[in-house]
């Protein structure tokens, strides 16, 4: 599911092609590390062909790469994230070398659970998402405050999620805040993005962006990004400091989605409090690393650097 998630993040037509070549290997959190030396020692190289679709092969590659990186860099690997696809249908592998874990909230300890039909609906969503990406039908309408795909099959599932969110809002809020099962919170975060737009919805998603589960954070932050893109005035309702801290995470999905949301918040300008946060040396160092990433993943960091430098 981890690889499928990263497939879904890029949403590029190139995924309709067979993607077995590694185009780029990128790092973050690498201050003080000789990246040239590190790349030369990796068991995987840029331009190398690899069967990413085989979970066993990917697991072996991940273990071998982490071992080499830790030996050369003398620090633990916080993330190994293969992401598809670039404009040529190639994979980019992102390797994290440092990050903060203290920004996440504790695992909830309640007993609430989602009904089976909502879990099944999320499974339908993930299957439809994979199929729509592979068909190259990656466009979506965000004008309503929730995403609706141009792909008819995907759109139908999303409309079903909208209906489910409106009927089960109180339960979804409860699960997001109190369910100890990470996968249940993953489902709740995704469907909560389709709920009635309100301060309560925004507050719940913002809190979920600090969840200990990577995919919960990803789903919640993306939902907030869609909301802001549909209505920039909502920027004032979102606690930007949460997402500035997420830029310092050791997980690639945190960096990717936090930068997306912050760029949306600052699309029409940022207040002085936001600019002060972005000007912190640790934040600017991380944004500088991200600004060197490949096209499609670097633009939000470049925007944030620019507005905080003006």
Image (cartoon, grey):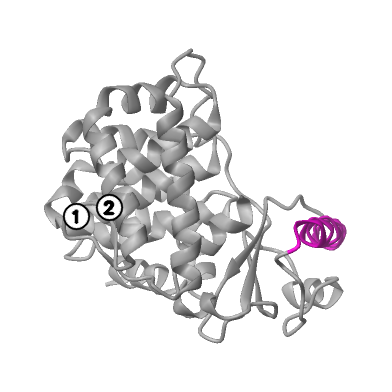
Residue numbers of the magenta segment: 54-73
Q: Quadrant of residue 90?
A: bottom right
Find disc 1 in the rendering and name its residue.
Answer: 271
Do the residues bearing badges 1 and 2 touch, measured as CB atoms within 8 Å? yes
> Is residue 67 located in the magenta-colored stretch of the structure?
yes
In the depicted structure, whether residue 45 falls above or below residue 195: below
Instruction: Give coordinates of residue 17: x percent, y percent.
Output: 57, 81
Q: Residue at x 45, y 78 (%)?
A: 13
Query: What secondary structure is marked by label 2?
Result: helix
**Can you see residue 210?**
no
Find disc 2 in the rendering and name its residue.
Answer: 274
Q: Is residue 118 left or right of residue 225?
A: right
Q: Residue at x 28, y 69 (%)?
A: 307
Q: Residue at x 52, y 24 (%)?
A: 106
Q: Quadrant of residue 95?
A: bottom right
**Can you see residue 89?**
yes
Instruction: Give coordinates of residue 100: x percent, y percent.
Output: 57, 43
Q: Give the overall secondary structure of the magenta segment.
A: helix
Instruction: Give coordinates of residue 62: x percent, y percent.
Output: 78, 58
In the depicted structure, whether residue 119 falls above or below residue 295: above
In the depicted structure, whether residue 137 falls above or below residue 251: below
């Amino acid at each position: 599911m981890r690889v499928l998630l990263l497939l879904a993040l890029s949403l590029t037509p190139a995924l309709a092609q067979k993607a077995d070549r590694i185009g780029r290997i990128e790092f973050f959190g690498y201050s003080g590390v000789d990246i040239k030396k590190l790349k030369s020692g990796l068991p995987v190289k840029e331009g190398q062909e690899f069967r990413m679709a085989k979970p066993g092969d990917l697991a072996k590659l991940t273990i071998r790469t982490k071992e080499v990186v830790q030996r050369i860099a003398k620090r633990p690997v916080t993330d190994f994230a293969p992401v598809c696809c670039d404009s040529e249908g190639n994979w980019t592998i992102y390797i994290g070398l440092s990050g903060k874990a203290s920004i996440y909230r504790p695992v909830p300890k309640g007993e609430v659970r989602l009904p089976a039909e909502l879990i099944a609906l999320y499974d339908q969503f993930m299957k439809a998402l994979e199929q729509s990406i592979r068909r190259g039908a990656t466009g979506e309408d965000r004008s309503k405050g929730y995403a609706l795909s141009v792909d008819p099959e995907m759109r139908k599932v999303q409309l079903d999620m909208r209906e489910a969110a409106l009927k089960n809002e109180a339960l979804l809020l409860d699960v997001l805040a109190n369910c100890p099962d990470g996968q249940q919170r993953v489902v709740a975060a995704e469907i909560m993005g389709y709920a009635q737009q309100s301060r309560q919805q925004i507050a719940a998603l913002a809190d979920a962006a600090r969840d200990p589960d990577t995919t919960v954070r990803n789903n919640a932050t993306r939902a907030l990004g869609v909301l802001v893109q549909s209505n920039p005035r909502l920027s004032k309702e979102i606690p930007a400091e949460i997402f500035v801290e997420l830029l310092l995470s050791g997980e690639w999905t945190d960096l990717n989605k936090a930068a997306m949301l912050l760029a949306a918040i600052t699309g029409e300008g940022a207040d002085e409090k936001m600019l002060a946060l972005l000007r912190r040396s640790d934040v600017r160092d991380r944004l500088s690393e991200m600004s060197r990433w490949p096209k499609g993943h670097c633009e939000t960091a470049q925007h944030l650097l620019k507005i905080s430098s003006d």
